[in-house]
Image: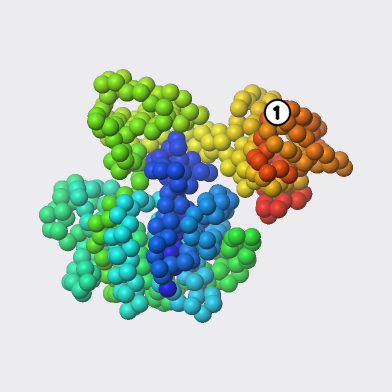
Amino acid sequence: MIVPVILSGGSGTRLWPLSRKMHPKQLLPLLNKTTLLQDTVNRFKTAADIDHAVVICNESYRFMVAEQVRQSEINNVDIILEPFGRNTAPAIALAAFNAIKDENDPVLLVLPADHDIRDVDSFLAAVNTGQKQSESGNLVTFGIVPDKPETGYGYINAGDSIGDNCYQVAGFVEKPDKNTAESYIEQGSYYWNSGMFMFKASTYLNALERLAPAMFEACQKAYSKSQKDMDFVRIDEASFESCPSDSIDYAIMEKVDNAVVIPVDIGWSDVGSWAALHDIGDTDAMNNRIIGDVETEASKNCYIRAESKLVVALGVDDLIVVDTDDALLVAHRGKVQDIKNIVEKLHNDGRDEVMLHKSVCRPWGCYQGIDSSDRFQAKRITVKPGAVLSLQMHHHRSEHWVVVNGTAKVTKGDEEFVLSENESTYIPLGVKHRLENIGKIPLEIIEVQTGSYLGEDDIVRFDDVYGRSEK
């Protein structure tokens, strides 16, 4: 049996302004109508030996991940919540302990949640080869056949052949300079390090216990004290806090003598930049990748994405233009790797545009900022049928609710009543309140907040079906 282990913890700062700290790239529909996470899960819908998967993410993404997994094509998915990011080696250890909890010892297929694979059939064929190698006790990695001297990836040097398109790993090398990358291409035995791995759960844990005993012990203890919470496996925070941070490459793969590499040519991309998104998408006659309401004239080699308004490009070349509700990025294609520097500067300046979009997902639905000033802000709130917000109160703001679509059940202090379209209510400061959609269609309300402080952390929760103790 194969269990895909999908690592979904990255933030994807190079894809700002679409990717935000609280809504990272793997949870966005960048290539089609489904998200990168859903694409990763859905790759296995035709695989006979896979009916269960594990997703590892942090606390902040848990409800978005759960909803996206629910909409995917594999129904049996465990979601493990890391209380802290400790890199890939501990994350995989948690998945391995989860896999053997019922005295099973499946083959784990470790995959980043944010990669694109165009040739799924070839990928699944390589997975079948990897399963055989894993069951024989090897630790498998997949090397991407390079098509250019890329300096942004690490490389794997393939050694002696062991048959079936598999090779002993002769070594892992860091991201090279251009001349070194060109020499790797000429030699023909070097492959891009994809960050995809395969091995039996016990093989990995045995190697970790031998090579990184402190990490093994911290992960074992943290998992043994984990708790099941709705769709989630919550890892013990106190135990995991002491866990060393390291990647699987450094902690395990570079130190073992049973690592093998399977070269693959599968139309792979790590979707690591806007330039990469341009290269893997469909383009027009002028090599422009156009998404949304965009008009171009005498422009070429551009990636232009319009999320909120008409964007017109006239006489420009080699540009990345990404428009969202609250931010506009204009960058040269050759400088996209430096977007992370801009994001860091914005973060240091305390800009909200780094953290959240105007439209913010919640387990009950979403809300979108409409307007704001020092002492008021307006939101459009959408609540899914049957969903209910927490029973809460605010110290610093009052709220006006106007129902524009659907039917709401409102709790206000000791009162409970129903509001329909064009009806409204007022929630005074300090009064406990709750909103519930009792209808069969999405409930939409306009909320106007007024007060001295309007931050999302001014919420005191008394009861919450989603187990939240804070925003």
Quadrant of the drawing holding the C terminus: top right
> Which residue is found at the position 21% from the left and 74% from the top?
162
Percent coordinates x, y for residue 75 in the rendering: 52, 61
The type of residue carrying mark 1 is: Val
> Which residue is found at the position 77% from the left and 49% from the top?
462
Q: Quadrant of residue 164?
A: bottom left
Percent coordinates x, y for residue 32 in the rendering: 41, 43
170 to 412, vertically: above or below: below
Q: Residue 325, can we see it?
A: yes
Relative side of 471 to 96, left or right? right
Single out the residue that lies furthest toward the front: 440
Percent coordinates x, y for residue 26 in the rendering: 45, 48
Relative side of 318 to 244, left or right? left
228 to 133, vertically: above or below: above
Q: Mark 1 points at which residue?
A: 448
Quadrant of the drawing holding the N terminus: bottom left
Q: Residue 215, can we see it?
A: no
* Observer-nearest of 303 and 174: 303
Q: In which quarter of the image is residue 119?
A: bottom left
Query: Secondary structure under badge 1?
Result: strand
86 to 352, vertically: above or below: below
Percent coordinates x, y for residue 252 in the rendering: 36, 68
> Which residue is found at the position 51% from the left and 43% from the top?
23
